[in-house]
Amino acid sequence: MKLFELITPALVEAPLRAADKWEALRVLSQVPVRAGRYPAAFAPVVEQALVVREQSMTTGMEHGIAIPHAAVDGLDELVAVLGLNPAGIPFQTLDGQPARVVVGLVIPRSKKLQHIKTLAEIARLLSRAEVRDRLVRCHDAASAVQALAELQA
């Protein structure tokens, strides 16, 4: 699945306000509640799954990208969240740069293997400098969604 197929304006946090990656994970776990993708009571489950995954190995990539992801029980469909922070968030990335584009993925445990391709597709998309640069210039959810649609069309 392509990122533009997963992201709606309600699933964009722009700007993503967080002092560090742990706070970013907390915020990202709350965004789908606002979007009606899962109930508020499920957000702590998602946050904990993201934290456990992050503690095992950083999901901070290179070039200002982080793709925190976790598989959880109790979810039927993959949920993606896009967080943008032009200044960047300390995320223990592989190159030491702050994460400016953060894509959170919450994957149904029963469909984990199906979404490895989705994860790879998102990483490949965000490896393109023009994609990262355009997203970071988006100041609101609508422009971020439009940018994704245009960049992946």
Image: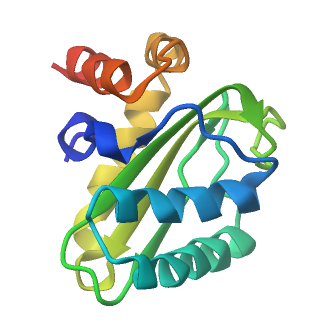
**x%, y% of residue 61?**
64, 42
Query: Does residue 143 sit above or below 122 in this rendering?
Result: above
Residue 36's image quarter? bottom left
Residue 103: image location, x then y, percent: 48, 46
Quadrant for the C terminus in the image? top left
Q: Give left or right: position of 25 versus 140.
A: right
Residue in front for this viewpoint, 90 or 141: 141
| Residue 31 rendering spot, x and y as whole percentages | 44, 56
Q: Residue at x 80, y 32 (%)?
A: 97
Q: Which quadrant of the structure image shows residue 113?
A: bottom left
Residue 102, percent across and down? 55, 42
In the depicted structure, whether residue 119 falls above or below residue 149: below
* Residue 4, quarter of picture: top left
- Name the residue located 65 percent from the left edge and 80 percent from the top edge: 52
The residue sitting at the bottom extreme is 73
Kindly identify the residue that appears in the image at 68 percent across and 41 percent down.
17
Q: Is 123 on the left or on the right of 10, as rendered?
A: right
Answer left or right for 96 relative to 49: right
Q: What residue appears at the point 24 percent right and 85 percent down from the top-left corner?
A: 110
- Horizontal placement of 3 versus 20: left or right? left
Query: Can you say whether 91 is above or below 105 in the image?
Result: above
